[in-house]
Image (cartoon, helix red, strand yellow):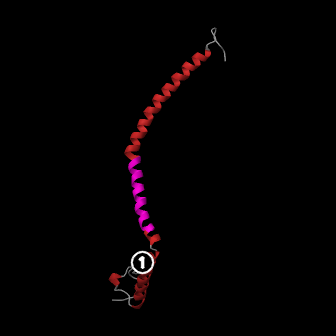
Amino acid sequence: MATNVNGNWKDKFKKKAKQGFDKTKVASQRGAKKIARNYGRYGAPTVGLFKSAGKLAMKPIKLALRFPGTGLAATGAYYLGKAIVNKGEKIASRSMSKQFKRKPFGKTQWTL
């Protein structure tokens, strides 16, 4: 670096650097206020929503881990009921108005 006649180039460098730091500090504080305001409006409610949803989702999981027999019994009852309904459908099918898997008209197996 070149020095001026007095040899005080460091003083000018310090002065310019301090001006730059001061401007940066002011700008960053302004930006931080905007970020904080936007977080308060949008970020915080979203975080709270996900936290509460996570807590609600964990309750049945914790219950299932504490009492595994209840969950197994409920699962068994569900599949047993499903098997009974399927067996009943094979033996005596529902009326055509109540069937969900009806074939389109023209390709039906029944006649009027």
Residue toward you, 27 or 11: 11
Q: On the rendered image, what quadrant is the N terminus found in? A: top right
Residue toward you, 22 or 87: 22
Residue 13 image point, x, y percent: 58, 19
Q: Which residues are magenta?
A: 43-62
Residue toward you, 102 or 93: 93
Name the residue at 34% across, 82% down.
98
Residue 3 image point, x, y percent: 65, 13
Q: Is residue 74 magenta?
A: no
Quarter residue 2 falls in? top right
Q: In the rendered view, tell whether residue 52 sits above or below residue 106.
A: above
Name the residue at 46% across, 74% down.
68
List the single residue furthest toward the bottom.
91
In this image, 53 relative to 18: left or right? Answer: left
Residue 82 image point, x, y percent: 42, 82
List the single residue furthest toward the right.
1
List the single residue furthest toward the front.
66
Q: Main secondary structure of the magenta part?
A: helix
